[in-house]
Image (cartoon, rainbow, N blue to C red):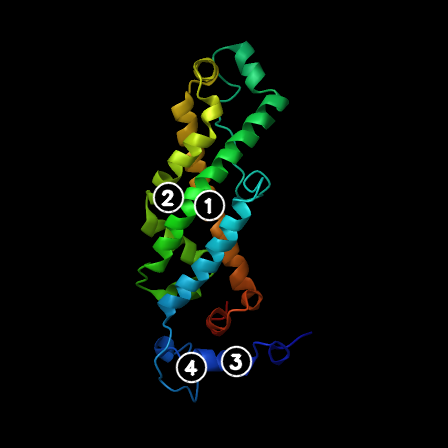
Amino acid sequence: MPTLTDHPFNRRTILTAACSWPLLASPLLLLPGCAQSPGLDLVEVIRRLLTISSQRAFASLMAPGGFYDSQVARITLPDQFGSGGSSFLGAVLDSAIVRDRLTRQVNRAAERGAERAAPIVADTIRTLAVADALGILRGGGSAATDLLRRQMGPALISAMLPGIDEGLRLFDSEIVTTTLRAATGIDFAGLRDDVTRKASDAIYAQIGAEEAEIRANPRATNDPVLIAALTLAGR
């Protein structure tokens, strides 16, 4: 089994990177022989973790079929589909062929929304305020993604809405809108809002999944700062 010294980022590399951080005076991370020289702090580590996690997530989701093919991010149709007042229209919308076509369409629309969301997320990460960087670093799982979501608030939904609106334009006709309302009780605007909310949840879920994967195997990033921080934090 490979050991730490077998990897290009070995113990010496990790210690060298770690010793450049002023915030490593924490009892958990303090290392013998470290000089207190200026360097990256743990807030920057969190930003780097989120940058790589979000870049991976958006690269995956904005690829053709990215949302639809994802086990984490696929957008489902509103629960009202196939359960509306008209039994005939409800049966049509609930048929496998129609549901699959509509599901693919809403997931393609989510890709449009993700294109608009990506730069907003990147900008937020660059200026992310982190009150407890060490706590986030130790938190494991999707702790950094959860912080990102709290700080972004409704900004992601607002950014995605126009792109999803454009992606769903196929539905925006009088006949389709009337059919949707009669069969499901929702109209185009309702469908757009539902897809936007779900796409927002899906993006955070995908970023969180990428973050958890990085925490589990930081060496795969080839980033000595992340490798040092996550290894020394025991993640």
User: Of callouts 4 and 2, which one flags the residue occurring earlier in the amino acid sequence?
Assistant: 4
User: Of callouts 1 and 3, which one flags the residue occurring earlier in the amino acid sequence?
Assistant: 3
Please report the residue visible at 51 percent of the width from the left and 22 percent of the height from the top.
81
Q: Nearer the viewer, residue 83 or 199?
A: 199
Q: Kindly check if marks 1 and 2 are in contact, taking CB atoms under 8 A apart as contact.
A: yes
User: Of callouts 4 and 3, which one flags the residue occurring earlier in the amino acid sequence?
Assistant: 3
Amino acid type of the residue tagged 3 in the rendering? Thr
* Above/below status of 47 relative to 175: below
Return the residue found at the far right. 1
Give the Cα separation between the discs numbered 4 and 2.
Answer: 37 Å
Q: Residues within 10 Å of mark 2 (few under 14, many from 20)?
A: many
Q: Which mark is residue 203?
A: 1
* Above/below status of 53 relative to 67: below
Report whether 178 appears left or right of 82. Answer: left
x, y (%) of residue 2? 66, 75
Q: Nearer the viewer, residue 59 or 235?
A: 59
Q: Kindly check if marks 1 and 3 are in contact, taking CB atoms under 8 A apart as contact.
A: no
Report whether 5 appears left or right of 47. Answer: right
Q: Which mark is residue 19?
A: 4
Which residue carries the number 3 mark? 13
Please report the residue visible at 36 percent of the width from the left and 72 percent of the height from the top.
41
x, y (%) of residue 84? 48, 16
Please, what secondary structure does the residue beneath circle 4 have?
loop
x, y (%) of residue 233? 46, 71
